[in-house]
Image (cartoon, rainbow, N blue to C red):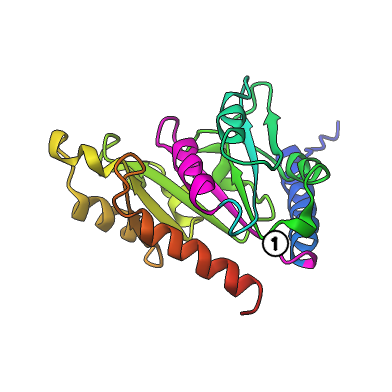
């Protein structure tokens, strides 16, 4: 009796990559720079986006697609800081966003009035690492309360990210966290990572984050 193996995962991933390529082309055609924010739950993605929207939302024409497993709470929080639509994607239990969901979300966004798109992925350092959403870069957040070995425990996410943001630095006096060791661990996994250290609560390090966003939008516009 013959046995045929169907590589379902490979086919699904190939289809996702095809859709991600279409998303990437669509964004490029409108001059939109897209960043995919990834992290474990509670690392501070939504709070960082709140502060970013409040400071730069209109200046950089920022739009947001945010993913969550069951609620649209994060989208509701972000909507308070912008007059633009915040597109919520409720995955219904799935641990990551995929390119089809992002493509559908873009249908509700005026891309001609958008220069910077944030995709706030589901809080998870495993599943989202493998899924291309059509973004320019993945930006991985990890916080001082998580431990310096986070990049070693979840290497694929750090390997596939271009930037790493160390969040909640205002808590450093109260937790046994070694910033130098955390960076060394991350660079061991991905020697090309560039870092930001910030506290969205106190504002420390936020100016460097804002200047980075301004510069990456200018680069995308060919300025």
- Which of 86/154 is in front? 86
Query: Where does residue 194 sit, x and y in percent of width and height?
Result: 38, 64
* Residue at the farthest bottom position: 223
- Quarter that holds the N terminus: top right
- Quarter that holds the C terminus: bottom right
Say what secondary structure mark 1 lies in. Answer: loop
Query: Where does residue 130 sit, x and y in percent of width and height?
Result: 59, 47
Up-down relation of residue 173 to residue 116 (above or below):
above
Taking the magenta stretch, the answer to whether it contains residue 40 is: yes
Query: Where does residue 90 sit, x and y in percent of width and height?
Result: 68, 26
- Which of 148/3 is in front? 148
* Relative side of 74 to 185, left or right: right
Identify the image quadrant of residue 137. Answer: bottom right
Residue at 44% x, 65% y is 211
Residue at 85% x, 35% y is 2
- Which of 133/82 is in front? 82
Query: Where does residue 117 sit, x and y in percent of width and height?
Result: 64, 52
Taking the magenta stretch, the answer to whether it contains residue 65 is: no
Residue at 75% x, 60% y is 27
Residue at 58% x, 23% y is 73
Residue 198 can be seen, yes or no: yes
* Residue at the farthest right position: 1
What residue would you read off at disc 1? 32
- The boundaries of the magenta stretch are 29-56
Up-down relation of residue 111 to residue 13 (above or below):
below
């Amino acid at each position: 009796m013959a046995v045929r193996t169907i590589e379902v995962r490979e086919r699904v991933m190939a289809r996702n990559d095809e859709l991600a390529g279409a998303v990437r082309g669509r964004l490029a055609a409108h001059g939109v720079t897209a960043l995919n924010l990834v992290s474990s739950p509670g690392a501070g993605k939504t709070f960082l986006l709140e502060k970013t929207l409040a400071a730069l939302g209109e200046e950089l024409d920022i739009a947001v697609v945010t993913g969550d497993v069951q609620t649209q709470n994060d989208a509701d929080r972000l909507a308070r800081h912008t007059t633009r639509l915040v597109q919520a994607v409720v995955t219904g239990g799935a641990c990551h966003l995929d390119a089809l969901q992002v493509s559908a979300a873009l249908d509700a966004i005026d891309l001609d009035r958008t220069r910077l798109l944030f995709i706030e992925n589901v809080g998870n350092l495993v599943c989202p690492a493998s899924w291309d959403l059509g973004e320019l870069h993945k930006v991985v957040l990890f916080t001082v309360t998580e431990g310096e070995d986070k990049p070693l425990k979840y290497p694929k996410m750090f390997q596939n990210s271009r930037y790493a943001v160390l969040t909640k630095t205002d808590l450093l006096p109260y937790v046994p966290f070694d910033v130098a060791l955390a960076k060394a661990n991350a660079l061991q996994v991905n020697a090309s990572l560039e870092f930001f250290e910030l506290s969205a609560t106190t504002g420390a390090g936020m100016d460097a984050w804002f200047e980075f966003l301004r510069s990456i939008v200018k680069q995308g516009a060919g300025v």
